[in-house]
């Protein structure tokens, strides 16, 4: 019995002697450096612990902190191209949710650079960052109406950005006339009745006639779609890209507007979001 009591007492003593578990240190936040580093790195807040309002504020603070280092304000040997930094900042201001992932990658690259003194990998990442941020994104939807006078002396003109699914209503004045050669017929944006056949013509599919107003849409990946417009048409963007227009011609230097001796014709072309003015 005495042996049992002694054992119980010893075990109880051991239990009391056992140290309470240590409280883990708080996560590093803000500017911090380890021993041997060439400078500081910025540690963002724990995004998952923040409410929506605090999270938005933390993103803004994190972007400002990263930019200060990118443009050389930390005096730590880091100084990236200002144009590159401005482009990245502009993209992140438009897509603030991406600041969180950028901050993580930036911290990893900063820690490696500060430990080694070599910023080559960090600088390479920075140089390609804006392109990677914009993959699949569209920052310039068609929300405004554009108006310009058609230039019959040049090819594709007046680039207008569109996002996937945007619809553009394109139309021009049909009272103004031009011709494609000194002895050619006078025509409007509807073009002539002569079909444009052969690869030399910008638009050579069905509906494309010589001299007609035609459009070209180029996606961000480089795929081109050429289509007839004439006096008016509506085009829906299949992907993010840029819309342009021209008259369907193979040479533009000899084109001429109709003139009554005092006033030259000049056709106007308008591109607006389909459904009305914005």
Image: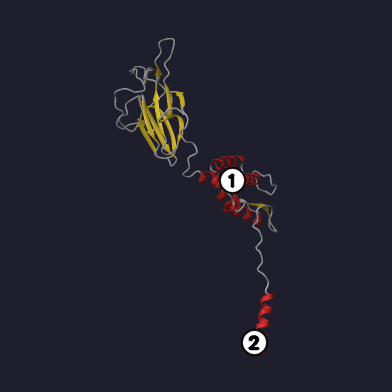
Q: How many marks do you count on the picture?
A: 2
Is 171 or 36 nearer to us in this picture?
171
Left/right of residue 204 with respect to residue 86 in the rendered view: left
Mark found first going from the N terminus, 2 or 1: 2
Around disc 2, counting alpha carbons within 10 Å, would you say few (fewer than 14), some (14 to 19), or many (20 or more)? few
Outermost residue on the front side: it is 1
Instruction: Tell me the colour scheme of the image.
Output: secondary structure
Instruction: Inspect this view and state whether residue 126 appears.
Output: yes
Quarter-of-image position of residue 183: top left
Report how far apart the C-alphas of labels 2 and 1 lie in the structure: 61 Å
Horizontal and vertical percent position of residue 226: 37, 33
* Residue at position x 61%, y 53% in the image: 107
Left/right of residue 30 with respect to residue 271 in the rendered view: right
Residue that badge 2 annotates: 4
Instruction: Inspect this view and state whether residue 248 appears.
Output: no
Q: Secondary structure at mark 1?
A: helix
Tag in front: 2 or 1: 2
Residue 246 against residue 68 in the figure, above or below: above
Outermost residue on the top side: it is 261
Is 154 or 214 nearer to us in this picture?
214
Residue 256 against residue 272 in the figure, above or below: above
Residue that badge 1 annotates: 53
Quadrant holding the N terminus = bottom right
Horizontal and vertical percent position of residue 272: 43, 28
């Amino acid at each position: 019995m005495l042996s049992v009591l002694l054992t119980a007492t010893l075990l109880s003593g051991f239990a009391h002697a056992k140290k309470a578990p240590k409280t883990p240190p708080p996560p590093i936040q803000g500017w911090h450096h380890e021993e041997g580093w060439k400078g500081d790195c910025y540690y963002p807040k724990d995004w998952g612990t923040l409410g929506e309002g605090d999270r938005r504020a933390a993103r803004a603070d994190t972007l400002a902190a990263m930019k200060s280092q990118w443009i050389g304000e930390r005096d730590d040997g880091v100084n990236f191209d200002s144009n590159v930094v401005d482009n990245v900042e502009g993209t992140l201001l438009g897509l603030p949710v991406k600041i969180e992932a950028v901050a993580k990658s930036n911290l990893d690259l900063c820690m490696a650079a500060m430990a080694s003194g070599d910023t080559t990998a960090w600088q390479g990442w920075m140089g390609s960052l804006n392109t990677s941020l914009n993959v699949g994104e569209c920052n310039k939807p068609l929300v405004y109406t554009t108006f310009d006078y058609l230039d019959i002396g040049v090819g594709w003109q007046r680039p207008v950005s569109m996002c996937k699914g945007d619809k553009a209503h394109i139309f021009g004045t049909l009272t103004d006339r031009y011709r494609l050669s000194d002895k050619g017929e006078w025509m409007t944006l509807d073009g002539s009745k002569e079909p444009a056949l052969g690869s030399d013509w910008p638009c050579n599919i069905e509906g494309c006639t010589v001299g007609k107003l035609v459009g070209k849409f180029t996606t961000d990946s480089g795929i081109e779609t050429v289509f007839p417009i004439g006096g008016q048409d509506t085009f829906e963007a299949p992907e993010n890209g840029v819309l342009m227009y021209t008259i369907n011609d193979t040479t533009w230097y000899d084109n001429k507007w109709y003139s009554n001796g005092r006033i030259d014709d000049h056709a106007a072309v308008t591109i607006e979001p389909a459904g009305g003015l914005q």
